[in-house]
Amino acid sequence: MLSFIGRSVIQKIVTLVFVSVISFLIIYLAPGKPSQVNPLNPKFTLEMVERFRKEFHLDKPLYIQYFYFYRDLFTGRTVSWKDNQPVLTKIWHRFLNSLPLFIVGTVITWTLSFPIGIRSAIFRGGFYDRTTTFIAYLLIAIPSFFFAYILIIFVVSRLGVSVIGMTTFGLEHASLIRTLMDRVWHMLIPSVLSATGGIAILSRYVRSQMLEVEGQDYVRTAKAKGLPSEQVHYKHALRNALLPFVTMFGLVIPGLIGGSVIIESIFSWPGMGRMAYEAILARDYPIILTVNFISAVLVLIGTFVSDLLYLMVDPRVSL
């Protein structure tokens, strides 16, 4: 086990280095030069542009720029070109804002998807199966931004409460309980919205996987022996049907950044996805490169966790 973990860590470190190099080259080859960010402001003179280039090592060869950027990043000296704030500090604050949305949305998705998918597979072709299939495809087909605006209009017009932002304006000096409940309410709507598409897709995967396992010989043998249907479905079939989802669970981690861009933008939630989107519009290259690097780290961590979980739950897999 230790040798497997060691080899996996080394492979992922090498992969991370290649990802960092490729992402740096993509930014360099993109239209426009980094030194053209500030000159877009007419107040900047040529002297100020040259000082900007020297300060951020843009006058050095590309491989030197790469070395300086990641040296400053790992030592905490990389700053945003937009507001001159430390990049890691900005990302950490936005990470703390995105984390509750990610956790609540993921819990809702995985908690509801499996009962829905399993029941659809057990009662295949019935009214429940047809209804959930129709609703799932409807949720997949509706764009998330369109569904978000419909939900906002419904909540605001029917309940008369605010759903935009992290808090309601004017409650800065309210009691702790009221402030906490207001934060939970503002977090609930975006979390539910982000979970709807995940429930629709994941429940279809669960249904198809259960149907595949239900057709195996050992399941038919268990039924022929006269075992109770609940024992056949939930002990023999379900345990083997869940194996592919162990791998999928590890790949949920990168969704902490990329899966929340639209939701955070619509609901004005200051999270990591919205920050990355704003950095792209502002051509804030330190933020873009750092978020891309963190995304790669999360993907590699997710795959590593999936490998370990799969080894623990499936005895047929050997190191």
Image (tube, grey):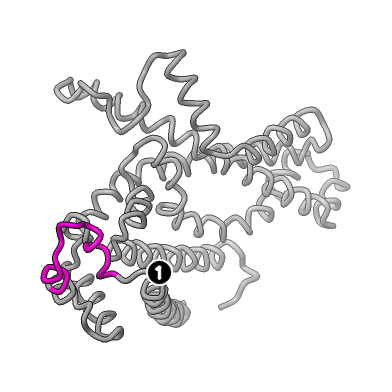
Counting labels gives 1
Is residue 42 rendered magenta in the image? Answer: yes
Q: Residue at x 22, y 60 (%)?
A: 88
Instruction: Say left or right for 48 vs 144.
Output: left
Crowding near the residue tagged with mark 1, few <14, some 14–19, many ≥20 C-alpha atoms within 10 Å: few
Q: Name the residue under label 1.
A: 31
On the question of residue 2 being in view, the answer is no
The quarter of the displayed image where residue 59 is located: bottom left
Measuring from the top left, give residue 219's x and y in whole percent.
Answer: 80, 52
Q: In this view, does 98 lie above or below 70?
A: above
User: Which structural element holds mark 1?
Assistant: loop
Q: Is residue 304 above or below residue 211?
A: below
Depth order, front residue of 81/151: 81
- Quarter of the image containing the C terminus? bottom right
Instruction: Say left or right for 204 vs 272.
Output: right
Depth order, front residue of 172/28: 28
Mark 1 residue type? Pro
The quarter of the displayed image where residue 84 is located: bottom left
Is residue 264 rendered magenta in the image? Answer: no
Q: Residue at x 31, y 55 (%)?
A: 282
Q: Which residue is drawn at 49% across and 40% down?
A: 194
Give the residues drawn in magenta, as a range.
34-50
Is the stretch drawn in magenta largely helix, strand or loop?
helix
On the question of residue 309 being in view, the answer is yes
The quarter of the displayed image where residue 227 is located: top right
Measuring from the top left, give residue 30's x and y in whole percent.
Answer: 41, 70
